Image (cartoon, coloured by chain):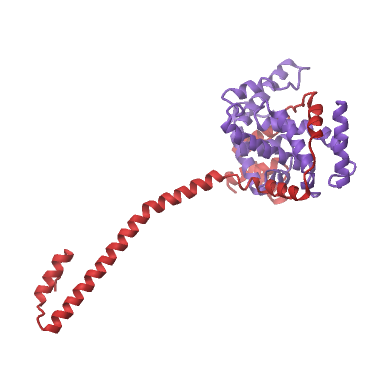
Chain colours: A purple, B red
Amino acid sequence: MHRDGRESMAGAASVSIEQGVINREQTFEGLVRQYKHRIFGYVCRLTNDSPDAEDITQEVFIRAYQSMHAFRRDAALDTWLYRIATNLVIDRFRRGKRAPHFVPVIGAAEEAVGELPSTSREGDPHASLQLDELQRQVQKAVHALPPKLRAVVVLHDMEGLSYDEVAETVGCPVGTVKSRLFNARQMLRRKLYCYMEGPE
Amino acid sequence: MSCGRIRKLIQVYVDGAATGPERDAVDRHLAGCAECRRTLEETRQLVHALAGMPGRQVSAAFDGNLAASLRYTAPVSRSAAWWERLRLRLEWRLRFPALVTAGSLAAAAMAAVVTPGLIRQHQAREERGRYVQSVLERHQQLEQSGALEWDAVDASIAVSTGSVITE
């Protein structure tokens, strides 16, 4: 990490410890280190790999730092960060309606899936190609979901949050989360039918 | 249990969140329903594919950029933080201002259409009341003067109201 950055992060950490808001062992730097990739991945999935995804992720941690008082001890840190990220993305999306460069344009999903990191480049090349193709199609289908359904399916099925945690993050009842997840999976199954057909 | 109900339960079944009776109901149904078995298999494969999507990594410059931003950032006060928490809590509930505005406009448009009709109806009712009152007054006057002729009154009412009184 950058030297200045380390000093500044350490300053942030000491503040958080003094205020006793975040766990004493949990420095702010540690929090960033632990969650930055997850939050970035979440933002990428919500924004269809917007070029602003890293800026939004940075903004999430700045907001988290600014509003450490707002963090409740009974809430999980990741849920809190996901919630800030969700609200930021929605704010940006609203602004994006007036600023067209932010809204994913037609064809952006295809362009974005081309940049999908490959997970299996070794071993059976045929299987690897199949997996890459499946992941591209899954990502494309997820990108095509309505934002509310996309948020729920990304949080639950891709980020691994429980129903309760998703409900806490998006601020709606657990029943609504289940219902949105059901609808999202139905839409995904319909789109990915040819890839899902038959037993593995 | 119907297939529609079972397909909703398949979701919690796959997520491992089904209760004992729900699991039993799904198992019983699946034993005799090939369509729902296929739904279960597809859902499992979908969930597996979603969970296996590769993660993303921030760029190497991320930490430095964040630290530089944090250098000029101070934590907000407790009261401001309270407002922030409230905002975060209400964010999703206040997400449909456009819907509220559309509803208000629809109500206003409906009122604009309906109100003149109601006013006209009220005016017509008042006019009829005044007419009936005048006929009654005229009737009383004629009765008091002893000049009441029923045929003339009936004819007058029939002309005024467009109806004919029959015995």
A33 with respect to A90 (left or right) = right
Quadrant, the C terminus of chain B: bottom left
Q: Quadrant of residue A163?
A: top right
Find residue B163 and report its horizontal and vertical position in percent. 16, 65
Find residue B120 and report its horizontal and vertical position in percent. 30, 59
Give above or below for B159 relative to B138.
above
Q: Quadrant of residue A29?
A: top right
Q: Quadrant of residue B63?
A: top right
Q: How many numbered marks, from 0 up?
A: 0
Q: Of all residues shown, which one is farthest toward the front?
A: B72
Tell me, yes or no, if residue B145 can be seen here.
yes
A184 with respect to B19 (left or right) = left
Q: Of all residues shown, which one is farthest toward the right?
A: A25
Q: Residue at x 63, y 20 (%)?
A: A111
Tell me, yes or no, if residue B18 can be seen here.
no
Residue toward you, A49 or A27: A27
Q: Residue at x 74, y 40 (%)?
A: A161
Q: Residue at x 9, y 74 (%)?
A: B151
Residue toward you, B84 or B57: B84
Find residue A58 and report its horizontal and vertical position in percent. 75, 32
Find residue A6 and report its horizontal and vertical position in percent. 87, 30
